[in-house]
Image (tube, rainbow, N blue to C red):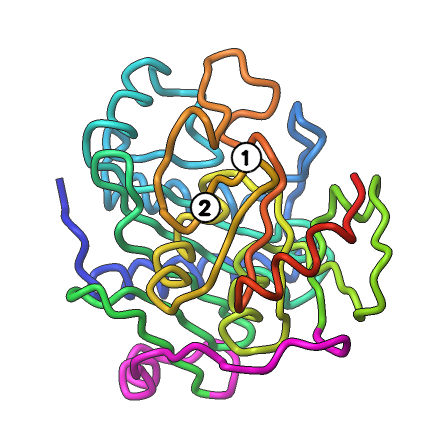
Amino acid sequence: MQDWNADFVLDLLLESAEIAHRIKSDPHVAVKDDRTPVSDADQGIENLLTEKLGAENLLGEETFQKRDHDQLIDQLLHGKIWIIDPIDGTANFINRRPLWGITIGYADHGTITRGAIFLPEFGQLLITGNDGTPMLADPGHPYPTRTELKNALAPAKHPGRKFDSTSCINLSQLFTKRGRFSGVNPVITVGSCICSGMDLVLGRDAVYMTNAKVWDMAGMLPNLAGLGFYSVNRSGQHLLDCRITPELFQLEADAKTPFALRETHWIGSSREAVETIMPLCEI
């Protein structure tokens, strides 16, 4: 099995972005059993990554049903595995918004140790270096070349913005539909987990509230952890330990929402920000 190599992963992301770029102006869209959309870009990218990484080494949003469930869970918890979401933010993608991206994570014995997220229409890349350092590239224009991204890569830094009543809070789609926020802070719903993760790193949002699935988050979690972000749910579990456990995720074969978080989690720039915002969210 191919181990994590940042240059190799960068090439995968760029090839994936080329597929999405060709399709985005006229995607073919279907609705899955869970009533979420899927496009031919999702399928084309997952086919590419399956070919490059091996179906037997992959947990992917569009293909996980094709694998033996017990074998997949055993590999996820006790072996090495790639975790991918070919298009995170499909609803944005098919409706011609730029808030989407490609995410690739790498887990070893139940811990996500490396990851990458790429937002092609913003040109932004967050990737774990081979030594474990979170690296950020932001060349400043859509669909940058490999050379432009490599030249722009530098160690990422925690944004360090002070949290106060003007700090923006990013709410999940689930919360937007069902919940109530009683705070004074401005709020936003982005519709893409990895775009939300990038907004945290860039200091645009102070807290991101999520009910995401493991493939939505795998590319960003080790980078957020490495930058010193804080996350917790109401049961006191810490998502940025980057552990994949049955207590955190719905891993059973008959799960209502396979591989999703069991509880809402809050990820923030600081413990203060998370603990201030959590009690203000009713769901």
Amino acid of disc 1: Leu
Q: Position of residue 205 (x, y in %)?
A: 63, 71
* Mark pair 2, 1: CA separation: 9 Å
If you read the primary sequence from the N terminus, does the residue marked by circle 2 or circle 1 appear first?
2
The quarter of the picture where the N terminus appears is top left
Q: Residue at x 28, y 64 (%)?
A: 128
Amino acid of disc 2: Leu
**Residue 152 in magenta?**
yes
Q: Position of residue 150 (x, y in %)?
A: 27, 81
Query: Residue 260, relative to residue 188: is it above or below?
Result: above
How packed is label 1: few (under 14 Cα within 10 Å), some, or many (20 or more)?
A: many
Q: Are marks 2 and 1 in contact (CB under 8 Å)?
A: yes
Name the quadrant containing residue 222: bottom left
Query: Residue 59, relative to residue 223: is it above or below?
Result: above
Q: Position of residue 244 (x, y in %)?
A: 37, 35
Q: Residue at x 38, y 59 (%)?
A: 225
Q: Find disc 1 in the rendering and name its residue.
A: 261
Q: Position of residue 264 (x, y in %)?
A: 63, 40
Query: Residue 33, relative to residue 148: is it above or below?
Result: above
Between residues 17 and 267, which one lies in front from this camera angle?
A: 267
**Residue 263 in magenta?**
no
- Magenta residue span: 140-167
Q: Find disc 2 in the rendering and name its residue.
A: 239
The quarter of the picture where the C terminus appears is top right
